[in-house]
Structures are given as C-alpha cells and as structure tokens.
Image: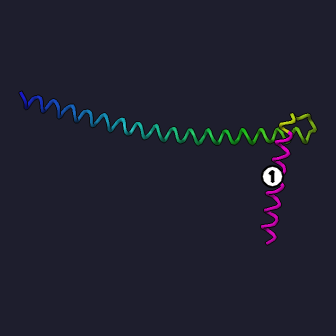
Amino acid sequence: MIHEELQKLEKLAYQAGQKLQVLSEENSLLKQKMADMTADLEKKEQEIDHFKKQIKISNIVDNRPVNPGDSAEMSELINNYIQEIDHLITYLSE
C-alpha cells in the first residue's frame, strides 16, 4: 500500500516537473514575443514622431498657420538642429 502511494507520488512529481518545463518554455517564448513587440512599438512611435515633425515643417514651409505651441516647439527643434550642425562643422574643421 505504501509502495503504491509512493508510485503515485512519483508519477505526480514527474507530471508536475513536465508541466513546469512546458510552462517555463512557454514563458520564455512569451517574454521574447513581448520584447519583440515592445521594440516594434517603440520603432513605430519614433516613426510617428518623425512624421509629425515632417508635417509641422511642411506647414511652416507652406506658410500655413501653426498653433503657437507647435511653432514654439518647432523653433526649439530648429534651434537644436542648428546647434547640432554647428557642432558637426566644428568637429569636421578640427
């Protein structure tokens, strides 16, 4: 009787170990999938920001009215670009 109970417990322990291994593999796959999707999401957010900036620049170039907040943001962005260009010119002239 005790021998049968031990066999049942061993069988249950083996099944639990198998299930744990399957769940661990599934967890690893899901973590990788989540990391991939997070990277894709970040890339798409960067693309959206880039397109928004292009639209704002197009509006300025086309002399369309731009919201005051947007024009201040664009002015700051243009100033940052100019500063970066100045840094690059300085670096290249050295």
Q: Position of residue 49 (x, y in %)?
A: 73, 40
Q: Main secondary structure of the magenta part?
A: helix
Q: How is the image coloured?
A: rainbow
Q: Which residues are magenta?
A: 71-94
| Secondary structure state at the residue bearing disc 1 | helix
- Residue 14, quarter of picture: top left
Residue 63 in the figure: left or right of residue 40: right
Q: Position of residue 90 (x, y in %)?
A: 81, 66
Residue position marked by numbered label 1 in the rendering? 80
The residue lying furthest to the top in this view is 1
Q: Is residue 71 above or below residue 92?
A: above
- Residue 7, quarter of picture: top left
Residue 40 in the figure: left or right of residue 70: left
* Within-10-Å neighbours for mark 1: few <14, some 14–19, many 20+: few
Q: Position of residue 64 (x, y in %)?
A: 92, 35
Q: Tell me the quarter of the image containing the C terminus.
A: bottom right
The magenta stretch spans residue 8: no
The residue lying furthest to the right in this view is 63
- Give the residue at x 77% y 38%: 52
The three-letter amino acid code for the residue at tag 1 is Asn
Q: Position of residue 5 (x, y in %)?
A: 12, 29
